[in-house]
Amino acid sequence: MPVTLKRRYKRRYILVLCNSSSEELISITRSKAADMFGYVLAQKAFLKLIDKIGPDLHVIRCRSEFLGEVLCVLTLIDNEHSAVVLDISGTLRSLRTRVVIKKNVLGTVLGTITKS
Amino acid sequence: MEANVIRLLKKKPLASTTFPYLVASNNYHDLASKDLDLVEITDIDQQFYEMLKHTPSKKLGIEITVSRLRATNGQKLAKNIALIKAIHSLTEKYGNQLVLTSGASSVFEMVSGRCFDALLKLCDIKPETYWISLNNWLEHKISMRCYACDA
């Protein structure tokens, strides 16, 4: 019998621009996901807050299988806490390298993001 | 940069312009208007369907904004998603074009391309075919007009 490796599920790291706090963003995302797709999918998506870069940039992790649903949820968060998806990556390292470029562009656009 | 911007005007200008534009309205009772290019849907009912069916095909754009979808929750959101699906099939049938826009009034309300694709997939619309048909529609609308020379 062929031996197969027990593989871990694939993850996607999403860079989100949002002016709410990280905790608020993740709780709103979870409740909106449950509202749109049900509690089972919201749980299966394994949404987790990974990092916060500056006051407005947040990194969220989810299962790649449910990336489409998570993107829909982030797009349809109410206008009060609205979130913009800036980048998606398979690894945190490549996302962090790209964040540096995006931060500079955003800094000129918004004029609010502080350099850390 | 300016050449890539398409302006939305409420009325068709009397003289030819130097910039590309679309005549837009947020009142779907204007569907029969000859000059109209784009109509934004705010609320949908049976009357809209009837009006769209009886409007002669003139490649009209039917705009739905994500900011309006954001304002809805649960059952109403599901209804709106079903509605986009219905409008898409209706526009395909009658030679019009569905235009999904962000409706953003600030940077925080903008929607990325990847998210648009995810939303389109949620509405059972193939993103590739949607973007191609939107591009063709825009090119058709813009190239149909006469523009004044800058110099």
Image: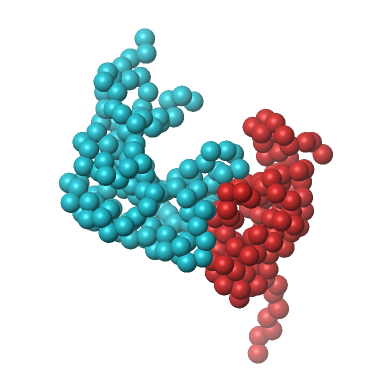
Chain colours: A red, B cyan
Task: State the image coordinates of residue A101 (x, y, percent, origin top left).
Answer: 70, 38
**Residue B17 figure quarter:** top left
A29 up-or-down from B6: above or below: below
Residue B42 at x, y = what percent?
Answer: 39, 49
Where is residue A104? Give x, y as percent: 71, 34
Residue drawn where x is 69% and y is 74% of the image = A7
Outermost residue toward the right?
A: A116
Q: Nearer the viewer, residue A91 or B18?
A: B18
- Who's the residue at 31% across and 17% down the image? B148
Above/below status of B51 relative to A69: above
Residue B38 figure quarter: top left
Q: Residue furthest bottom?
A: A1
User: Position of A85 compared to B14: left or right?
Assistant: right
Left or right of residue A41, residue B19 in this image: left
Relative height, residue B78 to residue B24 (above, below): below
- Quarter in which the C terminus of chain B is drawn: top left
Q: Does residue B25 lie above or below A91 as drawn? A: above
Q: Is residue B84 left or right of residue A77?
A: left
Q: Residue furthest top?
A: B151
